[in-house]
Image (tube, coloured by chain):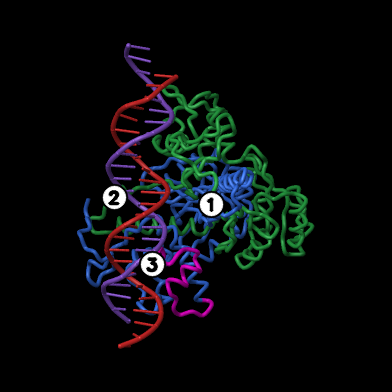
Chain colours: A green, B blue, C purple, D red
Amino acid sequence: MSQQRHGSTSGNGDRAGAVPAFPDLPEATIARLPEYLRALHNLGEGGADTISSEGLAAAAGVNSAKLRKDLSHLGSYGTRGVGYDVALLIEQIEYVLGLDQRRAVGLVGVGNLGHALAGYDGFASRGFKIVALFDADPAKVGERIHGLVVRHIDELPAVAAEETLAIGVIATPAGAAQAVADELVAAGVTSILNFAPCVLSVPANVDVRKVDLAIELQILSFHEHRKASLTALPGGRSATGAGNQEAVGS
Amino acid sequence: MSQQRHGSTSGNGDRAGAVPAFPDLPEATIARLPEYLRALHNLGEGGADTISSEGLAAAAGVNSAKLRKDLSHLGSYGTRGVGYDVALLIEQIEYVLGLDQRRAVGLVGVGNLGHALAGYDGFASRGFKIVALFDADPAKVGERIHGLVVRHIDELPAVAAEETLAIGVIATPAGAAQAVADELVAAGVTSILNFAPCVLSVPANVDVRKVDLAIELQILSFHEHRKASLTALPGGRSATGAGNQEAVGS
DNA sequence: TAGATTGTTAATCGATTAACAATC
DNA sequence: TAGATTGTTAATCGATTAACAATC
């Protein structure tokens, strides 16, 4: 185990003058950084040069203590009595998230959902570029979607060889997802975003995130059910329960 | 504060014989129940009558201790030495999630993503029915999508009056999302699934869940960046880091 | 200097996990 | 009964939060 961090209390900056050692961030913090980044971009476009933790926290929908704690993990980029420099903080967060380099995305499955994802503006505008579309259905291969020609899934190794895919997105039916994941892994992809409603099994060095739209609805359904059962109770409380806004992926 | 729960150690079943008091589940548990449910349906279709915590946990991608802990919050539906009755457990989880009643969903914004969501099979197959589509664009109003006619957003109150909407889905651009949320709330909707990349402000009794596709990619990007920086380090560790599969919304 | 706001501390809270007594 | 597996306990871990000293 090289690179053991010794008891330096300052977050990073060990190797004086060099690029700081890559910070080891809590998972919950990582999941919130993109939200801060979005808020900062909005504030920047609104003309703000500087923002307090209170102001940024409000824009990102968290409390200011949490925001300061999160940012403290990145190092110290604020000025006491003043706040954070918007441009500098954007730069820092983008660096940590690895957004200073454009990341190539391969999307597998151009059915209903995959088709929409292929054309989703939010990807391109935030540093990602879908560079290849794949499908197993011969009827779909060759089709042109949002400027890209759909290729057969068997061509994945060839495509991956010429263009390094940073992220693979799986938008196939559940039954096909594991096989696709295996092929992505074989092609060297180490990050997967899975929209298929199933658990994927992958090697330990591969990161998988899952988005399951029906699960989100079911979680909301639980809260609906709970709220209904509370108001139906004899002497039931009025709806004062914590209606919280939960970001997915925290 | 009526309905204060006194120190009864058994999870529920206070009011003997009656419907059990609605269980107060940890948020992390709630987010996993739909995953267990999906795994149970798969197992049931595979012919299993009974499943051990070890088996169900594997199918759901969690460890068995967590699974048993989660299920213990629902009450005691397993049999020691045997396992869980698949059908009974499905019934219990569906009851808790409120899936024994079909929930009507209203979808606002039938652009690229909204269009795909309107046709998403996974909703109907898991107890949800999209009953109305809305858009602000007059060019889209009247269009027929997957069997539903798109109505103008101004008709939302009228539609909500005749058909109780349990959940509102926002698939508009970020700039329109807050106004749509306000209208949903005014129409009596208390659960919102937000696909727009922005923070919504809603009353305390309204639950909001957010799905931000770009944020998921950015989280993966962080891990890509981290993995790259580790292997680039002098004497860098090989990729043994925890490549974990994180469910969104936990 | 006085006022403002960060970065850090320490307390608290909730979630995870391993171990095992209860019990089928 | 012996073997299997649940439900619960208690220890541990990570995340949240309020408060405040540091400092611009």
Separation of disc 3 and disc 2 at Cα? 33 Å
Residue underneath mark 2: A238
Mark 2 falls on what kind of element? loop
Q: Position of residue A45 (x, y in %)?
A: 57, 28
Identify the residue position indicated by label 1 in the image.
B107
Q: Position of residue B28 (x, y in %)?
A: 41, 56
Chain to which mark 1 belongs: B
Q: Is residue B138 visible?
A: no
Disc 3 vs disc 2: which is toward the camera? Answer: 3
- Whether residue B66 appears in magenta in the rendering, the answer is yes
Give amino acid for label 1.
Leu
Determine the residue positioned at 46% across, 68% down: B57
Q: Local crowd at mark 3 within 10 Å, few (<14), some, or many (≥20)? A: some
Q: Secondary structure at mark 3?
A: helix
Q: Residues within 10 Å of mark 2 (few under 14, many from 20)?
A: few
What is the spatial separation of the Cα atoms under label 1 and label 2, in whole angstroms? 27 Å
Magenta stretch in the rendered image? B45-67
Give the farthest residue toward the right: A142
Between tags 3 and 1, which lies in front?
3
* Nearer to me, A111 or A187: A187
Q: Which quadrant holds the C terminus of chain B? A: bottom left
Q: Which chain hosts label 2?
A: A
